[in-house]
Amino acid sequence: MSAPPFVDLDHNATTPICPAAAAAVVTAIGCGGNPSSVHRGGRAARRLVEDAREPVAALVGASPASVIFTSGGSEANALALLGCGRRRALVSAIEHPSVLAARDAERIGVDRRGIIDVDALADRLAASAEPAIVSVMLANNETGVLQPVAEIAAVARRHGALVHCDAAQAGGRIAVDVTALGVDYLTLSAHKLGGPTGVGALIVAADAPLQARVRGGGQERGRRAGTENVPGIAGFGAAAAACAAGLFDGERLRGLRDELEAGVQRLSSGTEIFGRGAPRLPNTSCLTMPGVASERQVIAFDMRGIAVSAGAACSSGKVGASHVLAAMGVADTTAMTAIRVSLGWSTTADDIARFLTAWAEISSGRAAAAAMASAA
């Protein structure tokens, strides 16, 4: 008897590549050619890159000329924060590690729902006349909580600050319009929206300053040197087009996510769902299993063929206390029982049913004990 299919409920780490993107990658690999070469092979590669630039830009209401392709979201974040020319930086306390580690920055707190304190940001900006850059993500990778980026940008503008928004988790999953947000820089990541890993983009407003961090070639209009990842970029473009055509059905995912949360609360009355009182991505739930450590839950679910995450999944497999939950005022003892469940375009109702069955077994203590014995 064959094992049941693997259930991926960790789409915020990476969502499976969609068929259109996979096909585009294969086609681009067969093309060959360096997009900086002027011969036939180079021109064919250049066409693939430029053809992909259009749907990536369109996904967020930007112009193709504003798109800089990078190796991923982390590089795009660093390019904005280090290339903007501003010495002073202010970021929310719940940003992705690639933002927090990019440079020294003043951190602005969030409330218990995980939403930035806009008044505190305004006060901090007013405390110094030094030109600054403000970086606030659109959707949190652990809780799915959405930030009031347009309001933040308006506050920043009044103080002469530039604004960067990490939209890696939001792009393709909810409507994103860079003009409506009012930001100067916006980050996207292909593998979060059904494209391949190893490619991302920074969207840069026409009048926003940007100094290249990688130099040595004229690629990307001189803003990011290095031969472009043609297969990755082609896949990125195809995934962006698929998202625009409805790859991520937000209402369907919201229904599945709500079914999951309701089921968990029926099974575990003490479960907390973080950010539930705030606007959230339709696919994300960060919730606790009282009495069972996060790491043990991940192991126990994996033993049942289900992938979930203990917080962010960008730290070489490390499981530690969540800086996001800590910033929200969650006690360490509670945070260390939290997992993140994130749905995607391939998630089905059967996946949710299997998760709830596994949750019932693990929360009862039997599976948790088995997982602990196996890991010992």
Image (spheres, helix red, strand yellow):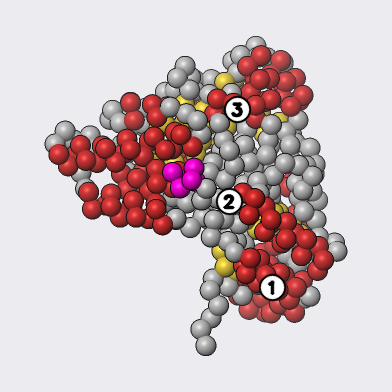
Mark 3 vs 1: CB contact within 8 A: no
Mark 3, secondary structure of its residue = helix
Q: Residues within 10 Å of mark 2 (few under 14, many from 20)?
A: some
In percent of width and height, residue 164 lies at: 56, 28
Task: Report the magenta residues as a range.
Answer: 241-245
Q: Residues within 10 Å of mark 1 (few under 14, many from 20)?
A: many
Mark 2 vs 1: CB contact within 8 A: no
Kindly identify which numbered label has been placed on residue 358. 1
Mark nearest the camera among 3 and 1 is: 3
Q: Residue at x 53, y 20 (%)?
A: 86
In percent of width and height, residue 62 lies at: 47, 29
Kind of residue at disc 3: Leu
Alpha-carbon span between mark 3 and mark 2: 22 Å
Alpha-carbon span between mark 3 and mark 1: 40 Å
Alpha-carbon span between mark 2 and mark 1: 25 Å
Q: Is residue 84 magenta?
A: no
Looking at the image, residue 357 sits to the left or right of residue 60; the answer is: right
Which residue is the extreme one toward the left?
39
Is 86 drawn above or below residue 230 in the view shown? above
Kind of residue at disc 2: Asp
Q: Which residue is mark 2?
A: 249
Dominant secondary structure of the residues highlighted in magenta in the image: helix
Q: Which residue is mark 3?
A: 181
In percent of width and height, residue 59 lies at: 49, 37
